[in-house]
Structure formats: structure tokens, C-alpha cells
Amino acid sequence: MLSDTEKTVHELYGAWGEKKIFGITRIGTIRSTFLIDPDGNLVYQWKNVKVKDHVKKVFEKFIELKN
């Protein structure tokens, strides 16, 4: 979990930009999840995340990469 009030990390990871909500185009946070290893390397990312089953998908990817 990260608080990024200056949008520095948002922009670095491509989590800030154009998105559509109810057919209206806006600029804002693109709901995303990033899996980062203990060395700080980005190992997997999900963009335009939907809540349903997302935690399960992240956990499954974590287990897959751990093995």
C-alpha cells in the first residue's frame, strides 16, 4: 500500500492517465496492482483491476513465482 500525493510513483508505473468511467473519459488513477520482489524489482503487474477475484489472482501469481 502506498500513498503518492505527488503522483510520482503513479506516473512511473503508468498508474495515472486517461480512463473511462460510465462512458466519460477522465484523467486519474488507473486501478493497478504491482507485485514487487524483495530486491525491489517489478515482477508482475495488473492494470485496470476489477475487485472480483483479484486478491485470488494476485495470491496465485505470488505462489507461482515463488516456486
Image: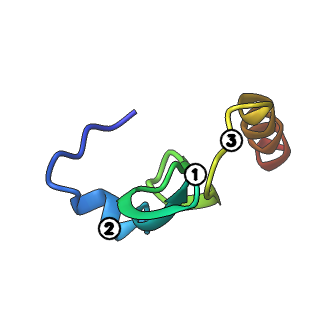
CA gap between label 1 and label 2 equals 23 Å
Specify the amino acid type for callout 3.
Answer: Lys
Which quadrant does the N terminus fall into? top left
Residue 18: which quarter of the image?
A: bottom left
Q: Check the image and report above or below for 32 versus 54.
A: below
Regarding mark 3 in the picture, which secondary structure is present there?
Answer: loop
Find disc 2 in the rendering and name its residue: 11
Crowd rating for badge 3 (residues with CA inside 10 Å; few <14, some 14–19, many 20+): few
Specify the amino acid type for callout 2.
Answer: Glu
Regarding mark 1 in the picture, which secondary structure is present there?
Answer: loop
Find disc 3 in the rendering and name its residue: 50
Q: Residue 15 placed where, x, y %?
A: 43, 60
Q: Earlier in the sequence, mark 3 or mark 2?
A: 2
Specify the amino acid type for callout 1.
Answer: Phe
Q: Earlier in the sequence, mark 3 or mark 1?
A: 1
Viewer-side label of 3, 2: 3
Viewer-side label of 3, 1: 1
| Residue placed most toward the observer, 45 or 31 | 31
Q: Residue 9 placed where, x, y %?
A: 29, 58
Q: Residue 22 carries which label?
A: 1
Give me the residue at 64% from left, 47% from top.
49
Q: Disc 3, disc 1: CB below 8 Å?
A: no
Q: In this view, does 3 lie to the left or right of 52?
A: left
